[in-house]
Amino acid sequence: MSAPRKDPVDAIVDQWAAVRPDLDTKAMEVFGRIFRLSRAMGDRMERAYAPHGISRGEFDVLATLRRSGEPYTLSPRQLSGTLMLTTGGMTGRLDKLERAGLIRRSPDPHDRRGLQVTLTEKGLATVDEAVGAGLTAEATALSTLNAEQADQLADLLRELLAGTEETGR
């Protein structure tokens, strides 16, 4: 069995070991790689969505509407809650998506003060194309693992995420 590849996180851990051998850097090894992976995949996803005229953040809005099912309509508050965005951040995204003809905002028929956000036909086509491009980018990155490793990693990350969210409350 060959030795595992070295990466930039190993170099950082080795530097800490040289100057602070008393530190347990196991968490740094895990989260350093998660952070680097997140940044690298974020960049890949931006490139995957760019040909569709949208950013990752805009994709998230369109995908949330798409996943909600027909009639692909949610309130700005529901979108903000799902995407963990401030209302100001959500307004900026909605403005851009509306200008591009990907969503439509209309009065909420059940709340005179409320709005509804609905995918347009163009928005539906865009998100359906973009999700395929994004999944292809993710599958390409994941192809460095075999199916068993990918399943194991997904299970481990699910456990880590659940534990992190529970202890963060």
Image (cartoon, grey):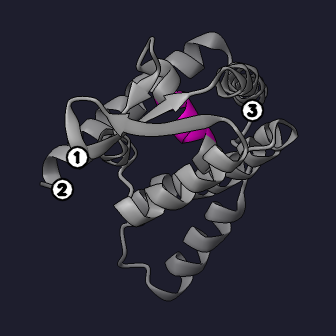
Q: Is residue 152 visible?
A: no
Contact between labelled residues 1 and 2, with CB atoms less than 8 Å apart: yes
- Cα separation, mark 3 vs mark 2, equals 29 Å
- Cα separation, mark 2 vs mark 1, equals 5 Å
- For the residue marked with disc 2, what is the amino acid? Gly
Instruction: Return the disc, 3 or 2, that comes first in the chain's sequence.
Output: 3
Q: Position of residue 80 (x, y in %)?
A: 35, 48
Q: Position of residue 100 (x, y in %)?
A: 73, 44
* Residue 37 shown left or right of residue 87 in the figure: right
Q: Residue at x 36, y 39 (%)?
A: 107
Residue 80 drawn in magenta: no
- Cα separation, mark 3 vs mark 1, equals 26 Å
The residue under label 2 is 168
- For the residue marked with disc 1, what is the amino acid? Glu
Q: Residues within 10 Å of mark 2 (few under 14, many from 20)?
A: few
Range of the magenta residues? 59-64
Q: Is residue 84 visible?
A: yes
The residue under label 1 is 165
Q: Residue at x 57, y 12 (%)?
A: 148
Q: Residues within 10 Å of mark 1 (few under 14, many from 20)?
A: few
Q: Tell me the number on the disc at residue 141.
A: 3
* Residue 118 shown left or right of residue 139 in the figure: left
